Image: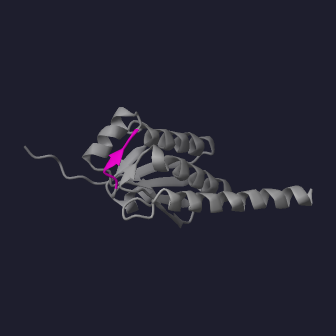
Amino acid sequence: MMGQSAGRETKRDMKRDTSEQERKQKGENKVGQAFTYEAAGQTLVIHLPREIDHHNCTILKNETDLLLAENYITRLVFDFTRTEFMDSSGIGVLLGRYKQMKGSAGTVAYYGAGRQVKRILAIGGIAGIVKGYDTKEAAMEGRPERREPCRK
């Protein structure tokens, strides 16, 4: 039993090393292409890169899955403030994390999405199931935001 447990930890460590190597090989440390994680209590915030496409979605999915598996996260928040482009593989990653969080009674939110990203989220069906916010604080807390009425 001890040998099996140690083997699992080694595989997990190797997976992390592989992700870092993949990121370096794909040039994702260039400005605007890296994504970062921030944890606050049981909330995990993922700061997304300028472009979310098939080139970086595998790394995003694998690292997020690893963080969710190793930590007790009840709220997952995606930060789109830097994101200018997202394709269908990005929708797939978001939908997969939504299903994963829903299965463990967690919630998912996003904030900072620009007009183009909001359009993609709407087309992909994400906007109908994941709550969007204007600010990080509101997204982390899940509180409704007070908005000014539209003026004609």
Residue 30 in the image, given as x and y percentages of width and height: 40, 64
Q: Residue at x 53, y 65 (%)?
A: 39
In this rendering, the count of numbered labels is 0
| Farthest left residue in view | 152
| Farthest right residue in view | 1
Q: Which residue is at the front of the view, 129 or 29?
A: 29
| Relative height, residue 102 to residue 146 (above, below) | above
Q: How is the image coloured?
A: one colour
Q: Tell me if I can see residue 72 in this picture.
A: no
Residue 128 in the image, given as x and y percentages of width and height: 39, 36
Q: What span is in magenta?
A: 83-87
Assign the N terminus to one quadrant of the image. Answer: bottom right
Tell me where residue 11 sits by quadrant.
bottom right
Q: Which residue is at the front of the view, 23 or 70?
A: 23
Q: Which residue is at the front of the view, 123 or 87?
A: 87
* Residue 2 part of the magenta-drawn span: no
| Relative horizontal placement of residue 15, taking residue 52 as reference (left or right) | right
Residue 84 in the image, given as x and y percentages of width and height: 31, 51
Q: Residue at x 39, y 62 (%)?
A: 137
Q: Tell me if I can see residue 27 in this picture.
A: yes
Tell me where residue 146 sits by quadrant.
bottom left
Assign the C terminus to one quadrant of the image. Answer: top left
Most common secondary structure along the magenta stretch = loop
| Relative horizontal placement of residue 96, taking residue 6 as reference (left or right) | left
| Relative horizontal placement of residue 98, taking residue 52 as reference (left or right) | right
Residue 110 in the image, given as x and y percentages of width and height: 40, 51
